[in-house]
Image: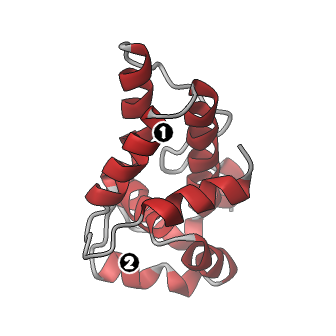
Amino acid sequence: MNEDTFWQIIEDCRPAGPDPEAELLAANITDRLARSSLELVTGFAEQLSWALYQLDRKENGQGLSGDAFLYTRAAIVAAGRAVFGRVLQDASAFAPFVIDGVWAESLLYAPDRAYERITGEEWGRDTCYSFESYSNAEDWAG
């Protein structure tokens, strides 16, 4: 899956009404992926991991617990491509998500849930990039 397809899925699955913790978004993505191929599910997981990895930077996460940092990064991805791009360009755009306590933990599990629906088995996901907090060693060095 390419980056454009990933962001289009996020946009297409965004609910019309309020979704403060992206639970509806995650459910919609899970449903969409579960009606697709395993290739799309694994591709989505790869792109999600890559996006979260890119946000895993010292200037964004300093002073946050690992979970808070991860769930906040997920909220930025859930907010869409434009917000994601702004945060990559300007770390100060990350702060409002921290101040307001905006999290999107459920987005992390959407591909896993879709995989399980398709196969009936739990997925031992192993993506090229880790989405875990502080795994982007290059951006945490120094």
Which of discs 1 and 2 lies nearer the camera? The answer is 1
Residue 135 point in image, percent of width and height: 58, 45
Name the side, left or right, on which 105 lies relative to 45. Answer: left
- The answer to whether residue 65 shows anywhere in this view is no
- The answer to whether residue 36 shows anywhere in this view is yes
**How many residues crowd around disc 1 within 10 Å: few (fewer than 14), some, or many (20 or more)?**
many
- Which residue is under mark 1? 33
* Amino acid type, residue under disc 1 in the picture: Leu
Q: CA distance from mark 1 to mark 2?
A: 27 Å
Q: Quadrant of the N terminus?
A: top right
Residue in the image at 27% along x and 64% along y: 21
Which of the pair 119/95 is nearer the observer? 119
Residue in the image at 71% along x and 59% along y: 4
- Which residue is under mark 2? 97
Residue 11 point in image, percent of width and height: 51, 66
Residue in the image at 60% along x and 71% along y: 81
**Residue 17 image-quadrant placement:** bottom left
* Amino acid type, residue under disc 2 in the picture: Phe
Which of the pair 65/115 is nearer the observer? 115
Q: Is residue 43 above or below residue 89?
A: above
**How many residues crowd around disc 2 within 10 Å: few (fewer than 14), some, or many (20 or more)?**
some
Q: Is residue 120 above or below residue 42?
A: above
Residue 26 point in image, percent of width and height: 36, 51
Q: Is residue 111 above or below residue 94?
A: above
Which of the pair 90/120 is nearer the observer? 120
Which numbered disc, 1 or 2, marks the residue that appears first in the sequence? Answer: 1
Q: Quadrant of the C terminus?
A: bottom right
